[in-house]
Image (spheres, rainbow, N blue to C red):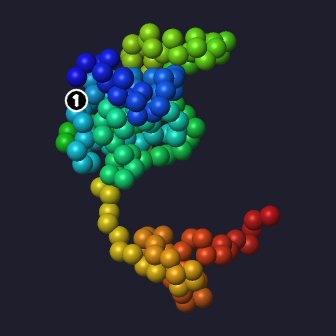
């Protein structure tokens, strides 16, 4: 599939064209080039995004990374940075968006990113987050307070009962 068709699929998924979507689009294409990636049918490709902005939608469309599949994870730093991992080869890369002029309008920014080559947009760095383990399957447990079912990894013990995070009362003697 050519890049124009890929872009159109990203726009259809996201709902509109914007600079943010372009950032994720170019990052995913660059990761394919750098790591020899293909669309991930399971967890062969992993993306750790440092933001929850528009570009993440392009990563999902192009690389098949998704929260439900367990190969799209968030390490929220607020940065326009994405780490990509190829489980088959063990290789990884962190792509960090380079600075651009702050004087651009949204339209100018969109045109700028659309016209950039990925290698001109991103600094290529070593991934700082270790390759996450494969997604685990957990048993379900009923909260003994509200009765709702919750994944066992989110259960807490409180007064001898299994409780969900919503029912759990945090304890911290040092918070103000």
Q: Position of residue 127 (x, y in %)?
A: 39, 37
Residue 92 position, x and y percent, is 31, 36
The residue at 47%/46% (across/down) is 74
* Residue 33 can be seen in this image: yes
What residue do we see at 60% from left, 88% from top? 159
For label 1, the SS is loop
Q: Quadrant of residue 10?
A: top left
Looking at the rendering, in which quadrant would you find the C terminus?
bottom right
Q: Residue at x 25, y 18 (%)?
A: 2
Q: Quadrant of residue 30?
A: top left
Vertical placement of residue 35 versus 141, above or below = above
The outermost residue toward the bottom is: 160
Above or below residue 93? Residue 87 is: below
Q: Position of residue 133 (x, y in %)?
A: 32, 55
How busy is the neighbourhood of tag 1: few (under 14 within 10 Å), some, or many (20 plus)?
few
x and y, in percent, of residue 65 in the image? 34, 42
The N terminus, quarter of image = top left
Residue occupied by mark 1: 36
From where the camera sits, is residue 130 visible? no
Q: Nearer the viewer, residue 141 or 13?
A: 13
Left or right, 49 with reference to 157: left
């Amino acid at each position: 599939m050519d890049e124009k068709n890929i872009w159109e699929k990203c726009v259809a998924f996201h709902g509109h064209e914007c600079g943010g979507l372009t950032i994720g689009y170019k990052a995913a294409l660059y990761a394919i080039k750098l790591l020899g990636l293909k669309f991930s049918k399971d967890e062969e490709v992993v993306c750790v995004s440092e933001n929850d902005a528009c570009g993440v939608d392009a990563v999902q469309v192009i690389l098949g990374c998704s929260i439900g599949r367990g190969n799209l994870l968030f390490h929220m730093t607020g940065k326009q940075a994405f780490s990509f991992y190829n489980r088959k080869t063990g290789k990884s890369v962190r792509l960090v968006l380079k600075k651009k002029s702050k004087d651009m309008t949204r339209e100018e920014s969109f045109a700028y990113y659309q016209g950039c080559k990925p290698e001109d947009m991103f600094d290529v760095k070593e991934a700082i987050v270790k390759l996450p383990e494969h997604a685990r399957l957990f048993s379900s447990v009923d909260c003994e307070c509200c009765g709702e079912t919750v994944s066992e990894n989110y259960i807490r013990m409180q007064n001898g009962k299994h409780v969900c995070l919503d029912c759990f009362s945090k304890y911290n003697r040092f918070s103000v």
